[in-house]
Amino acid sequence: MEFQISNKAKKVTLGLMGVGLLLLIVGFFFQKEYVFPTVLSDHEVYVEYWGDQGDKEADVKAEAEEAMAALGYELDFGDEGEEHEVHAHGAVEEHGEGHGEEHSDEAHAHQSPTFEWHIHIKHLEAEGHGAHAHGHDSAPSESLAAMFTNGDIAMSDSHFRRFWSNLLVNGFFFFGIALGALFYLALHYATESGWGVVLLRIMEAIMSSLPLGMIILVIVFIAATLGLNHIYPWMDSDVVAHDDLIWGKVAYLNKPFFWIRIICYFGVFAYFMNWFRKTSRNQDSEDVEKATASHFLMYRRGALFLVFFAVFSSTMSWDIIMSIDTHWFSTLFGWYAFSGIWLSAMIMIMMVTLYLKHKGNLEYVNSSHIHDVGKWMFALSFLWSYLWFSQFMLIWYSNIPEEVIYFVTRIESYKFIFFAMFIVNFVLPMIFLMSADTKKSWPYLIFIGMVIFIGHWFDVFCMVMPGTLFEEWNFGLLEIGMFMTFLGTFVFLVLRALGKSSLVQNNHPFLEESKHHHG
Amino acid sequence: MTDKVIYAMYDDDDVTKDACQTLVDNGVHVADVFSPFPIHGIDPIIGVKHTRLGIAAFMYGITGLLLAIIATRYFMVTDWHGINIGGKPNFSYLENIPSFVPILFEFTVLCAAHGMALTYFLRNKTLPGMPARNPDPRTTDDRFVVEVRLAENSNFSLDQLNDMIKETGIVEIDEKTIK
């Protein structure tokens, strides 16, 4: 049983990639860096900016003036911004409560903002009061502050943080899918399972796309090491020097050791991926005795991989994801990230199986196989929800400041996607995949599968973004475009890999059992 | 009304399954199969109806969940209103719901599991102390028995049935008259 990627599939995947790339490029030029307002009264707003783009101050001022003039107000920025830059810290504190505290937990070496404004809002003399009084209910200071917080008035981001963060999100998500398939393949061999033999080649094809995620992640890490992005605060020696908590973790979180670990994980994963693929392809042309020997070799290597994976999938997710929020830690994090990885891989296996079955390439796959993969999707959704909730509930309940800050950021700035993602990923599979019939039904599986696939992309989004973009996150062309690019590339690579070998492992000792699999 | 019953004994689950398939293909109605463990895939062959135990379990689970919600709300919010436990005062049920999720989950599982087990026992009339209903005690050990009733197979004579069964790899055959 051979499979060759059809021209239509090629067009769809490469088209997805092309359109995504286009959106991505457009989105790339709309990355913003925000200035943060504090509303002091109906006509007063305090604005401060801590970044390194002080030269753009005049542009932002002009933008704010223009926007408020359209509403019929005039702005008085209080003082000349340039002068303020050299003011002592004490000068700021007389403005009112609140500001002093915000400064103290900033990790910046210099103790005053790049620029700060004390804006007084006045009505434009020329305009009549009545003309605008009914136009907006909120105070003018609120409207101005809203324009700052939602990014209408902002400067372009010179560090492209949104781009890098998205690269990390997608890199990790698609790396995870390939890794999850490799893990499941190893599990299948190590447990000497029989039922899924006719699906092993699909898992092999999915895990062959491992290099895509790895390359992207390595690009992100190289950029982080060179200081091109600020994803990992502990890579910035300035930050580390002024931060006792990070200083205490330097023995583990330092660049050389980080790179040793990354090379070790990626090297081992790539080695096992290649080895499994090569051995199983060779097995196809071996005689029965040799093929059985190969099978037992894969059985032992599978167990070996699982041991490595059990320990280092945890530390890997600490290194790649958890160290973004360097102050925070959770021992459950590794399992939580792993359950998401495994589930995404299972959904991908299901989707590719349904596609190939639809094309008529999988004559041995019957509804029992599909039912079993559906069971995995159902069960792993529960595992993931259980771990997500265990992590959330314990931290929420104990309410220890250094722990709970992780969820405070997420609930304050990401409330909707954070909870919607959890509810969708938990409730949808629970209700719709509970019955045995829906676990075999194509429309259900495709619909639920796609929704929770995207739901788990948002899970990774919620792991990464609050630590890299804080409240300055956005969801737009850049995010959609990059996801499409990655999805198109990934599916293209998987379908191409499927064509490189027979879809059935003819010499697998359990092939007969799998053909007659009956759940 | 009296009826003749044939008990055919086998020593392997796959042989039992194949035997049932052969009999059913010949038009014989198999009344029941006694086995020490569940045999995968035998249900559709002998025409056992799909169990509704799962639906019952779901109902018991929902009942447990509702009971637990009512109970925790009454204990922690209505009765002990505003007691501060671990910095989480119980003024509002909704705001504190994460702390009740473990007990909601546990009670759901408790009700579903016990309800399901009791229903199973009652439905099968296998409460402790009840007489065993399997034809041969060895079916709880390592033997499999296929039960064929004459009244349900009016197309065949007793001898025809016996002959057909004897060709299916049996280890023993037994005949009983029941009232």
Image (cartoon, coloured by chain):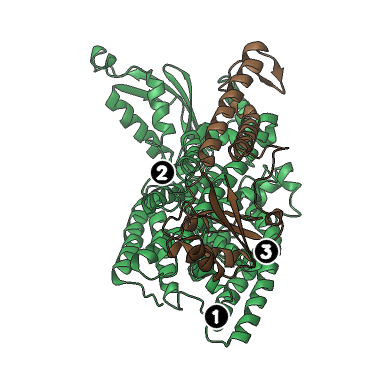
The numbered mark 2 sits on a residue in which chain?
A
The mark nearer the N terminus, 1 or 3, is: 3
Q: Amino acid at mark 2?
A: Phe
Note whether residue A209 is visible: no
Residue at image position (38%, 17%) is A139
x and y, in percent, of residue A348 in the image: 46, 59
Which element type, helix, strand or loop, lies under badge 2?
A: loop
The numbered mark 1 sits on a residue in which chain?
A
Note whether residue A275 is visible: yes
Q: Amino acid at mark 1?
A: Asn
Q: Which residue is mark 3?
A: A306
For the C terminus of chain B, give its image quadrant.
top right
Quarter of the rendering containing residue A289 = bottom right
Which element type, helix, strand or loop, lies under badge 1?
A: loop
x and y, in percent, of residue A304 in the image: 70, 68
Q: Which chain is brown?
A: B
How many residues crowd around disc 2 within 10 Å: few (fewer than 14), some, or many (20 or more)? few
Q: Are marks 2 and 3 on the same chain?
A: yes
The mark nearer the N terminus, 2 or 3, is: 3
Q: Which residue is mark 2?
A: A475
Quarter of the rendering containing residue A306 = bottom right
The mark nearer the N terminus, 1 or 2, is: 2
- Please tell me which residue lies in front, A506 or A406: A506
Which element type, helix, strand or loop, lies under badge 3?
A: helix
Q: Nearer the viewer, mark 1 or mark 3?
A: 1
Q: Which chain is green?
A: A
How many residues crowd around disc 3 within 10 Å: few (fewer than 14), some, or many (20 or more)? some
Q: Amino acid at mark 3?
A: Leu
Residue at image position (27%, 18%) is A135
- Please tell me which residue lies in front, B63 or A453: B63
Mark number for residue A507?
1
